[in-house]
Image (tube, grey):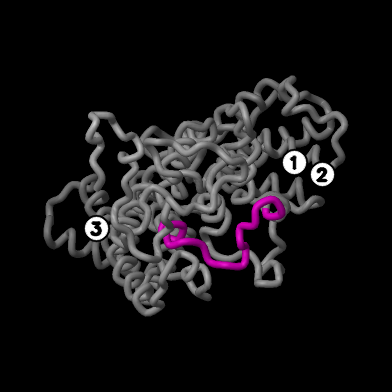
Amino acid sequence: MPSLIDSNGSVDLFATRAVPRLESYAEDSRHSRGRLIDEPESPTRSHFQRDRDRIIHSDAFRRLMHKTQVFVHNEGDHFRTRLTHTIEVGQIARALARAFRVDQDLAEALALVHDFGHTPFGHAGERVLNEALKFCGGFDHNAQSLRVVTQLERHYAEFDGLNLCWETLEGLVKHNGPLTDRDGDGLETPVPTTIADYNLKQDLHLWSWPSVEAQCAAIADDIAYDNHDLHDGLRAGLFGFDDLKDVPLTGEILSDVRIAYPNLEDGRAMHELVRRQITSMVEDVIRESLGRLRHAGAKGADAVRDLDYAVVSFSPRMEEQEKNLKAFLFEKMYRHERVVRPVQAAQAILSDLYDVFWNGRADMPNSAEWRLDGLDDAARAMRIADYLAGMTDRYAVAEHQRLFDHTPELR
């Protein structure tokens, strides 16, 4: 590591950016493909550290604090929000990146930005906007995240958005895998218009797998929401410990906890179960992924992109166990009346707000960025969706109360 002070006693700020030893398949911030708009390098931060910091200091990041994960805001202070979920994903993504000796800052940046496009009230809001925008391609929260970081954040003097590095944008768009084949055709559904349009400006290689760092963020998201939704469901009383006995892995871990601590109070037992299960999943991913990386023999980050499979993955056995846990949560939690009933109310709130702005019965904020006059139908719909998607749960409720005589109760 270079000295921070040279022979003349001057501080070398660039020396503070020394990169730890990384594996050959890691992204190297010193060789980033750059930003859409060129900027001078920071003397104290790598490109990926700078991206992470811009993400943390954005309005979109702060708004996650008041956006629904599963339970709406009036259910209680101890349930996860989009922000706490995002921080938990970031911790797991860094742990994986550290184990694989890839760039932890890039993995964390991708974890912290991955939910920027989510609407208020979670997937309920997304369903409303997707239905409203069907005539112009629909609404996709992943594409909306790209809109946020390339257009809707407006703080910098020289550009809209955050002007993030190519590697960060690529990982944001494709963290769950390729979007097209090599000919550019969508794999399952057409590529969202926002992503397709941006790709014309800066080719994100939509046909390839993303970096190891992006794959770390993607699987960290699965691990975090599986386990923390389990924790929140237990805390809320939507199901009990007895319901978990036949859930593979979860039931085994719970049995081990009960044997080791037969008199443990439920609150501690919940945490012990979840902590052990996270550890089990993380360690499984590390073992499986290191084996895949060794087998692939990938020499360079682009060699990972050229593979036709993910290198960061659960083992087949853990993948099956994780699917069973998801199925349990879907049945016992996501379809529970205490979750479904507020979702229906939330959808009504977002639908009313979209309709009132679309039909001109109320105005959005009186500033140039939100004006609807002069726009064609597709652009008008997208601007309304931008406004609604950026709302927090509380702000959406307050807007509905301002514009309507009756607002559905989220309970």
Element class at badge 2: helix
Indicate the position of residue 207 as horizontal and vertical percent values. 62, 67
The amino acid sitting under disc 3 is Arg
The alpha-carbon separation of the residues under discs 3 and 1 comes to 43 Å
Q: Disc 3 designates what residue?
A: 276
In the image, residue 366 above or below residue 125: above
Q: Which residue is mark 2?
A: 378
Type of residue at label 2? Ala
Q: Say which residue appears at 52% left-offset and 46% top-offset.
A: 115
Please give left or right for residue 45 compared with residue 131 in the image.
left
Distance between the alpha carbons at the discs numbered 2 and 1: 6 Å
Q: Is residue 117 visible?
A: yes
Of residues 394 and 285, the one nearer the viewer is 285
What range of the chain is rendered magenta? 199-216
Asked if the magenta segment contains residue 211, the reply would be yes
Given contact means CB atoms under 8 Å apart, are the residues at marks 2 and 1 in contact?
yes
Is residue 257 found left or right of 181 in the rendered image? left
Q: Secondary structure at mark 1?
A: helix
- Residue farthest front in this picture: 8
Q: Nearer the viewer, residue 71 or 60?
A: 60
Which is more foreground, mark 3 or mark 1?
1
Q: Is residue 345 visible?
A: no
Is 352 colored magenta in this rendering? no
* Residue at x 50%, y 40% (from the top left corner): 68
Q: Which residue is mark 1?
A: 382
Q: Residues within 10 Å of mark 3 (few under 14, many from 20)?
A: some
Camera-near label (2 vs 3) is 2
